[in-house]
Image: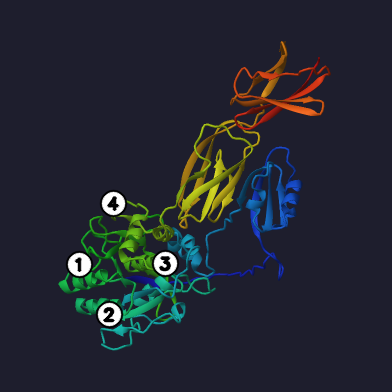
Amino acid sequence: MRYRTLIVAVALTAASLTSANPAGATTGETVAIGLRPGVSAAATVAALDADPAVRVLASDTNDQLGAVTVTVTGDAFRALAGDPGVDYVEPVPVARVDRTPNDPLQSQQWGNRVIGSPAAWDVTTGSADVTVAVVDTGVTAVSELAGRVLPGYDFVNDDADPTDDHGHGTMSASLIAAAGDDGAGLAGLCWTCRILPVKVLDAGGSGGHDDIAQGIVYAVDHGADVINLSLGGPASSQILSDAVTYATDRGVLVVASAGNDGVTTPSYPAAYPTAVAVAGSTETDTRQEWSNHGSDWVDVAAPGVNVAQGRDGGRYWFTGTSSAAPMVSGVAALGLSARPGTTAAQLRSAIETTAVPVGSWVADGRVDAAKTVSTLLAIDAPPPAVGWSSPAASTTPRRGKISVVAAATGATRVELLRAGRVVGVDTAAPWTFTFDSAGLNGSHTLTLRATGPAGDTRTANRTIVLDNTAPKISKVRVSRSGSTVTITPSVRDDSGIQQVKAVVTAGAKKVTLTASKSPWALKWKPGTRKATTPVTITVTDRAGNTTTHKIKIKP
């Protein structure tokens, strides 16, 4: 343990934020609409607003990007599905700076910044359902911990008053749970979690393994989720080892400081395999020179110089692995807050596997709060699955508006993409889209992208053949043989001709002639008709595109 008085002079300016929407105003979702060349943004917005199920609250055009953003109530995605002038529709995500609390000393708490606490606070700032036991010199309910210090026990004096008579335990607790964003003092890791004070060290900062072991068991039996042990020494004992095992066997994570002698000699209880051993790191992720180390027994590192609140209410620089361990315990508490029900094994794995590599002086690296939280959230949600229900895989060309149906499970959102651009979004089953293929020809790959609740994605591709070009009729040859007139159009289409049809208007009578294979000869018997006869020829390709051509047959 090392600490010294912290003297600060901070000017804090508080700014209030006023909503841009007046009281009672209706809010909506903001979406971006990509427009195809030549399409009017104003016309598209007007058409959207004309939909009785949609109300446009505001719009803003970006001519350079060929897009318009609109704020709407109602389902703009369905309203614009299949609109030939719309290239894509997508929600407008909101980007914001990572949450920074307004505590005056936060700017000096470089440890919070280094381990990614602001990004973790964007997800959770803690939970009153999470309890961290500080097994130490006791804890005094100073201002940063007010209302969140539970009744505990003093194993040094054998009474129910675990008030801190040294200062070390209170500083450890404040790193874990000092109230954040309250305009005063400092910000701990888990702003709303509770502290269980267990006094096992005396006023001089020393205590026997028997009292420490009893304190660990007490913490487990009184609901601790995490136990912080900012204490230790080179000697091991069976009673202390058994107490740490007692905790981990019952699903409690034990975090312990590695010691401050600058050596590789193991320190206990940190060196017990069931505990998470924590070394002290610098602002640049190097080892603090005084920190014990060794990748064979030290698991992770954490900032070893932090601002803490002492038992007298003052703020101090708290230095040592005794300061680093509470940073890890605080990260663990945030992880449990984000994902209730996390096991101790899952929590430890998340802390260790997401640690940032810092060198061979620790096994895993420097702890990362944001990555720990996101990894734990991902455990809750199995990855989504997505596949194609329709259209079926086929080489038959398609045209115009194409109905797409996805088969997805475990998804909160499914998108349809072409050429990397989102052309449709659905947020609930049945996952349906209308893809407007106007102007597209040849083979194109469409992608369905499903996003799960943890943000992970899965995709499924389908290649379809598009033909939005009508067949061509270059000329029509008319020949006679006896009483039969043969009409033979010369036709061409890249995807193939499906049918050639001719409608012969002979006075009040119409005769329909069809041919389904080359040479597309249409035979008509005019009988005794002597008048000029109009004929409309319609050619249909395999995708359903048609071309008509009119001729007149003279007698």
Q: Which residue is mark 1?
A: 234
Q: Nearer the viewer, residue 12 or 195?
A: 195
Residue at 48% x, 60% y: name it: 119
Mark 1 vs 4, N-terminal side: 1
Q: CA distance from mark 4 to mark 2?
A: 36 Å
Mark 2 vs 1, N-terminal side: 2
Q: Which residue is mark 2?
A: 218
Answer whether labels 3 and 1 touch (C-beta < 8 Å): no
Q: Is the C terminus in the top left, top right, bottom left or bottom right quadrant?
A: top right
Amino acid on which the number 1 mark rests in the picture: Pro
Q: Nearer the viewer, residue 413 or 327?
A: 413
Q: Is residue 538 visible?
A: yes
Q: Position of residue 177 (x, y in %)?
A: 42, 73
Q: Quadrant of residue 85?
A: top right
Q: Is residue 287 visible?
A: no
Q: Which residue is mark 4?
A: 360
Position of residue 126 relative to residue 299, above or below, is below
Query: Can you tell which of label 3 and label 1 is closer to the viewer?
Result: 3
Q: Residue furthest front?
A: 528
Amino acid on which the number 3 mark rests in the picture: Leu
How many other residues sit within 10 Å of disc 3, few (<14), some (14-19) or many (≥20)? Answer: many
Q: Position of residue 430 (x, y in %)?
A: 54, 53
- Number of marks in the rendered image: 4
Amino acid on which the number 4 mark rests in the picture: Ser
Residue at 27% x, 81% y: name it: 202
Disc number for residue 334: 3
Q: Position of residue 135 (x, y in %)?
A: 30, 76
Q: CA distance from mark 2 to mark 1?
A: 24 Å
Query: Can you tell which of label 2 and label 1 is closer to the viewer?
Result: 2
Mark 3 vs 1, N-terminal side: 1
Q: Secondary structure at mark 4?
A: loop
